[in-house]
Amino acid sequence: MKVQAAHEPVRAALEREGARSLGRVEQVDVYFDAPHRDFAARDEALRLREETDAEGTTTALTYKGPKVDDTSKTRQEFETTVGSRGEMQAALSALGFEPAATVEKTRERFELDGIVVSLDTVSGLGEFVEAEAEATEADIEATREAVAAVLSRLDLDPEAQIRRSYLGLLLDD
Amino acid sequence: MKVQAAHEPVRAALEREGARSLGRVEQVDVYFDAPHRDFAARDEALRLREETDAEGTTTALTYKGPKVDDTSKTRQEFETTVGSRGEMQAALSALGFEPAATVEKTRERFELDGIVVSLDTVSGLGEFVEAEAEATEADIEATREAVAAVLSRLDLDPEAQIRRSYLGLLLDD
C-alpha cells in the first residue's frame, strides 16, 4: 500500500512507534515493453532494477504479474539478481523487449511489526510512503490488514492509498 | 568449431602439445521456446545453464543470435549470471517462454594457444571435441583460422566440423 505524504511527520511517527531503520538505497528502474503483449493492458511489468546502497550496486530482474485482488497491490512476482545489467538489457533487446520508461527514486526503509515501510522520493513525482509485506495466497487478507494497521499507526490513511505504480503515475504526466 | 571424436587420443595429443587443464564441469542446459518467434527458424536460442564445478553451482542466462558467417559457429551472444535459476525460469514462463529441451553434458576444458578446447560427453549423443575463442567482428576470420589450427594440432580434422548444436543433434534423434 502506498500513499502520497510529506516525509517529515512520518519520520517522527516511525521514531515514536519504535521502527527500525533498514538504511537508504538509490534505485534506477528500467521498465520494458514486450514484443508480443501489451503489458499495460494486461497489468504486467518487466523491470530491471539497479540498486545502490552502502554495500555497493546490484541489479535484479523482476516480472510482476497482474494484481491478484482489488483492495491491495498484491501481485505474483518472480525476481532474481543478475550479474550484468548491460548483458541482461542487451539480451532483452535482442528478444524484442525494449526500454519503455525509467523511474529513479531514493528509498529509505524502516521495519515496523514485520512490515517494511519505505519513504520514497521519486524524480518528477515527489514524496510517498509505501508499506509492504510478503503474503502467501492463504494469508493475503490478513497481511493486507496488518499493512493497513501500520499505515494507521503512522497517522496515514490506508483509504488514501494510490494503487497506481510510480511508472503509471509518471506516464500520466 | 566442434567435431565428433573419441576423447582418449585427443587427451594424449593435448598432453603432447602442452595444453593446460582448466578443470571439469557438469552443465545442465534448458533451452526455451519463444511465444512470438520461431527460434529454430531464426537460428536464435535462449538458454538457462546450471553449471557445477569444484567451486559450486552457478546459473547463467544466454541469448544467442544467428550465426554471423557460414564457416564457423560464431554468433552474437549476451550472457549474464543469475542468482536464482527457479525465479528466472518462473519469470520466463510467465512471459510465455517455455522449456523446449534439456541438454546435459560433462565438459573437460583445456587451453592451448589461447584457444579453449573442451572434451564434451553429451547425454544421448556421445563424445565431442569443441575448440572456441572470442572474436571481434574485425578478427573473426583470423580467429577461425587459429581455432582450426588448434584442431589440426590435436590430429582432428577441422573440415569434419559439425555446425549443428547439441540441441539440434538431440532434436534430430
Image (cartoon, coloured by chain):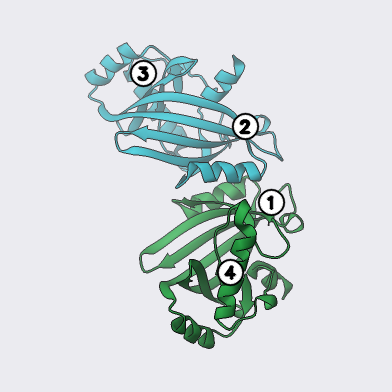
Chain colours: A cyan, B green
Structural crowding at the residue carrying mark 1, measured as other residues with C-alpha within 10 Å and reported as few (<14), some (14–19) or many (≥20): many
Look at the image and tell me in which quarter the C terminus of chain A lies. Answer: top right
Of the numbered discs in the image, which one, if any, rests on residue B147?
4
- Label 1 to label 2, Cα distance in Å? 21 Å
- From what the image shows, is residue A169 above or below residue B67? above
Query: What residue do we see at 56% from left, 35% from top?
Result: A68
Residue that badge 2 annotates: A43
Of the numbered discs in the image, which one, if any, rests on residue B34?
1
- Circle 3 SS class: helix
Q: Amino acid at mark 4?
A: Val
Say whether residue B125 is visible: no
- Label 2 to label 4, Cα distance in Å? 49 Å
Residue B14 percent coordinates (x, y):
48, 81
Q: Are marks 2 and 4 on the same chain?
A: no
Whether the residues at callouts 3 and 2 have beta carbons within 8 Å, the answer is: no
Query: What residue do we see at 34% from left, 38% from top?
Result: A56
Of residues B41 and B74, which is closer to you in this image? B74
